[in-house]
Amino acid sequence: MRIRNLYQKNDAKIIFLVADGLGGLPHPDFQNKTELEYAKTPNLDALVPFSVLGLTIPVDYGITPGSGPAHLSLFGYKPDEVEIGRGALEAYGIGYIMAEDEMAIRANFCTIDGGRVVTDRRAGRIETDEMKRIVGKLSRNILEIDGYKITFMPGKEHRFVIVLKGKGLSDSISDTDPQKEGLTLLPAKFLNPDAKRAADLVNKLVESILEVLKDEPRANGVLLRGYSLKPRVEGFTERTGMRALSLANYPMYKGITRILGMETPEAGETFADLLDYLKTRYKEYDFIYLHYKYTDKAGEDGDFLKKVKAIEELDAYIPEILSLKPDVLVVTGDHSTPALLKAHSWHPNPTLLKSVYMGFDGIERFTERNCRLGSIGTIYAYYLIPLAMASALKLKKWGA
Amino acid sequence: MRIRNLYQKNDAKIIFLVADGLGGLPHPDFQNKTELEYAKTPNLDALVPFSVLGLTIPVDYGITPGSGPAHLSLFGYKPDEVEIGRGALEAYGIGYIMAEDEMAIRANFCTIDGGRVVTDRRAGRIETDEMKRIVGKLSRNILEIDGYKITFMPGKEHRFVIVLKGKGLSDSISDTDPQKEGLTLLPAKFLNPDAKRAADLVNKLVESILEVLKDEPRANGVLLRGYSLKPRVEGFTERTGMRALSLANYPMYKGITRILGMETPEAGETFADLLDYLKTRYKEYDFIYLHYKYTDKAGEDGDFLKKVKAIEELDAYIPEILSLKPDVLVVTGDHSTPALLKAHSWHPNPTLLKSVYMGFDGIERFTERNCRLGSIGTIYAYYLIPLAMASALKLKKWGA
């Protein structure tokens, strides 16, 4: 079923509010409640009687996703359909749009000793400004290797991105990062014969970088991983027909939506900034992805009460979002991040969909346990896009 | 899994009662109830405590089906597996069984001016008798073109069906219907090179028809669309093992079941006629499809109370159906048609299955919201046939 063929344009707006890592688990220290159950969420609660609820599985039963696959599923892509390398995510995340003949690499500065043994994998956690200075030095000194153009781009702290440009590149090569301190820098090895040239190139690149860095006191080494050619993925607009705006504060999420071709501005540092931006551009789009990071951060910290607070803060933004009068509002997570686990998990995402054309379940609160009783049922997350589009009357009838 | 290989013959009877467009949505003008919730359905309600309930998705999440795909799914065919052209549906609907070397076309009489501009796409809505007279005239005057045999068959009002018979036909040709009044009749164009001969043939056919019609005051033109070769689809009996009787009042549904090879008599004009017919042939079949149209018609009209009444009238027939003592009774829809939307929709079908071998859910009424709590769950409609067959003990064990 190709959604694009059923698309019919109208003025309806879909807001897709994704609270990262929203779902949680009952916690023994907090009355055996989940973070959502423990939180006071009057504004979400007020929506529930007029919404349908459900649970969405990001990838598959028991599979814990990274943010990349979890978001792709949310945007309607089946998990096995697309693979986006980490290097590409980083490059797009900082605003770089890759060409067909390019390969992106995640790079970290590190500290090495005279025998190329890694003594600090994060180069003493150098600050962003210091990293930028050194990336500038690399940019000035290494413009190309064997005819391949080399671009260095700063990230945050000790992280940066390298893009190689030229014919016949391959990402089937091994990391140079030994993953542990006390081990020697690894050479890049080709993992299939076609990748020999790319591995040679990467090894020459490392030598050139080490030469430029040799007088740096802390950032005198480099670790490479996440080699990625330009991701091959159908754009979100090509796939759904909808003009899409992506509003996120963090590079990774911006990277994903840029790869999918969504309009992804640099809209500010806080969630409030995103909402301010949204008000100025709301009319131009059919679909708005709005990313809220803080639930996931607190969950990863294992800080139950901090996650509760993040949920309550999100709840306080709901009236502002509703003031835009979206025809369809979806509130969901990309994956769960229970404070009990201090990590992403496989538990399905609590999901709410509000639209006059979806009916309502007559349930009282938005919690994981209530969502399992909702009429959306427990579905794969990639079905949310067609459900949201149908609820916005953006899909016409299939067949006579 | 091939159901046919598991089939075991017994005397159990399955009645599959399909109330077209049964599912609805809560309506703000009617206490926020759905049509099923608002209706008084004492006979269905009496079944519910001894039945299992569920929701069935016709095609996929968010996809609104036409009646063709929705029915194919009900009969156990996956939606992408079969495509049946509209011309074939019309031909089979009026009782014509196509051969391998035939192509069916939906035809409408229309009114054109001297420059072949369409001035009335329905030829002044001529009456069925008048249409039959003109179809008779075409039949007498046009027997063949270039060696291809041409058959004209009356439908209703301005509609009729043309069947072409001969070698090398193709349905990859464009409509001659410009879709709007004030536009000129279009020539049929071939959409791939193999279809050139078929396009030429259709254009000659149009010229011949226009010549015959030239003195008609209103029906002096013809619009062609929905070209279809004989549908390639495995028969229902070949697939399931069951001998099947189809009882419907409307041509489209008869067309679908004839294409699937079900016994599809002309059983009368009303639902009561269908039940009378059923009593005379009940013992001969394993599976009986019983179609009730009026729920969909009222939903498409956006007439909530008319749909409620259609549901209540259906409810009144339930005792008569039960008097046949079916071993399995399924009550479901093909798709939803909420009065709120005045159209088919993507919402899953409320579904009831009564069999002593399925247990019961202890739910009180047959409504959309109760169905989501039932033990069938929310499933694709094409799983209903195996569930009904299992409940009739018609499927033996798979594997040792």
Image (cartoon, coloured by chain):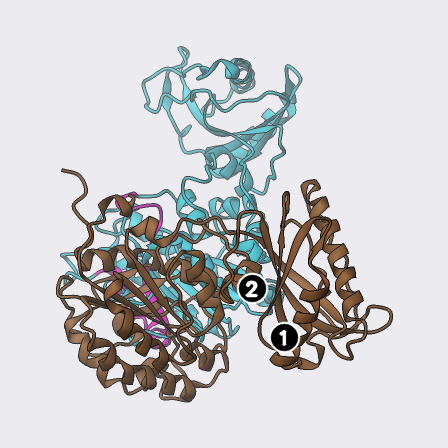
Chain colours: A cyan, B brown
The residue that appears at 27% across and 65% down in the rendered structure is: A367
Name the kind of residue labelled 1 in the image. Lys
The residue that appears at 51% across and 13% down in the rendered structure is: A196
Q: Which residue is mark 2?
A: A278
Q: Quadrant of residue A278?
A: bottom right
- The foreground one among A106 and A189 is A189
Name the kind of residue labelled 2 in the image. Leu
Does residue A237 show up magenta in the picture? no
Query: Which chain's residue wears label 1?
Result: B
Q: Quadrant of residue B314?
A: bottom left
Q: Secondary structure at mark 1?
A: helix
Q: Position of residue A91 (x, y in %)?
A: 54, 37
Report the magenta residues as a range: A34-63
Q: Position of residue B364 (x, y in %)?
A: 19, 78
Q: Position of residue A199 (x, y in %)?
A: 51, 16
In this rendering, does residue A254 appear at all? yes
The residue that appears at 47% across and 62% down in the rendered structure is: B68
Q: Is residue B333 left or right of residue B110?
A: left
Answer few, some or many: residues within 10 Å of disc 2's Cα (few below 14, many 20 plus, some between 14 and 19): some
The residue that appears at 27% across and 62% down in the rendered structure is: B285
How many badges with numbers are in the image? 2
- The foreground one among A78 and B153 is B153
Q: Position of residue B392 (x, y in %)?
A: 18, 59
- The foreground one among B150 and A105 is B150
Q: Which residue is mark 1?
A: B132
